[in-house]
Each structure stands twice: as C-alpha cells, then as structure tokens.
Amino acid sequence: MAFKEVLDFHYITISEAKEVMEKISEERRAVAELTFETRRALKHLRLFSKLPAEKAKELVSELMKLPQVEREDIAVKIADIMPRIRDEVRIIYAKEKIVLTPEQIDEILEVVNRFRS
C-alpha cells in the first residue's frame, strides 16, 4: 500500500473549497456520475459559502493584518462564519487563550462588514 506525503498545508475557506469541488465535479461528470458523497459535499459547500472565493481570500488577508487575529485558521473561521455581532466573535475565540476587548471585536466586525454583499 502506497501512502501519499503531505507536501504543503494551509487552511482554505468554505468558498475556496466550493470552487475546488465545482472544478472536480465538472471533471468527474465528464467521465461518470458523481458519487453520493461528492454530491452531498458540494451541496453543503454551496449552502454555507457566503462569499465568492476571491473575496473570501481577501477577507482572510485583511483579518490577518489585525494583531488579534494572529492565526490563519482563526481568520478562515471568521471568514466562513461572517459574524454580525460581538457574541459570534467571542464564540470563535472561546477555546483560545486570547481574551478580546470590545474594541478588538468591533475592529474584526468592521473588517467583516466591509466584505458583506
């Protein structure tokens, strides 16, 4: 049995994953019908993606510039959820060792709101 080696790893948003799955499903549809799992994954991604992939990438970049968003995984989670209120941001940070001030939370919400459609 051959194992594949992970050469690179980075987090992607739901919107980016949807874009990747759309391309994969187009290729697979040309050869055969999509599997149940692929159809379900695609349905989930379409349902929960809130931005176009490029805008989601931009949002993650903008969030990473904030000192309170120090990790890519947190920025991606914020971009996926697109929080509207302080409590939603607090929930994202609930398991982190960071306690955000109301001003820091408002700063995150301001960035997110700039990307809302």
Image: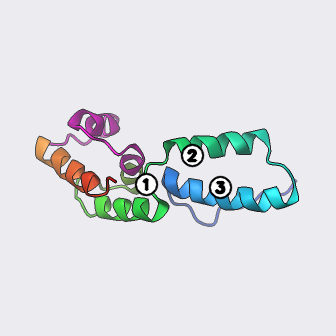
Q: Nearer the viewer, residue 48 or 93?
A: 48
Residue depicted at x 30% and y 56%? 70
The residue wearing badge 2 is: 45
Q: Position of residue 77 (x, y in %)?
A: 41, 47
Q: Quadrant of the rendered structure where residue 63 is?
A: bottom left
Q: Is 75 in the magenta?
A: no
Q: Position of residue 13 (x, y in %)?
A: 48, 53
Going from N to C along the chain, the mark reached first, 1 or 2, is 2
Q: Secondary structure at mark 1?
A: loop
The residue wearing badge 3 is: 21
Graded by Cα atoms within 10 Å as few (under 14), some (14 to 19) or many (20 or more), the crowding at tag 1 reads: many
Amino acid type at mark 2: Leu
In the picture shown, does residue 38 fall above or below 24?
A: above
**Magenta-colored span:** 77-101
Going from N to C along the chain, the mark reached first, 3 or 1, is 3
In the picture shown, does residue 1 fall above or below 96?
A: below
Residue depicted at x 71% and y 43%? 39
- 91 displayed left or right of 14: left
Q: Nearer the viewer, residue 24 or 64?
A: 24
Q: Verify CB contact (< 8 Å) between mark 3 and mark 2.
A: yes
- Checking the image for residue 41, the label placed there is none
Going from N to C along the chain, the mark reached first, 3 or 2, is 3
Q: How far is mark 3 from mark 2, CA to CA?
A: 8 Å
Amino acid type at mark 3: Met
Residue depicted at x 40% and y 57%? 72
Q: How many marks?
A: 3
Q: Secondary structure at mark 3?
A: helix
- 100 displayed left or right of 54: left
Q: Quadrant of the rendered structure where residue 57 is?
A: bottom left
Q: How far is mark 1 from mark 2, CA to CA?
A: 11 Å
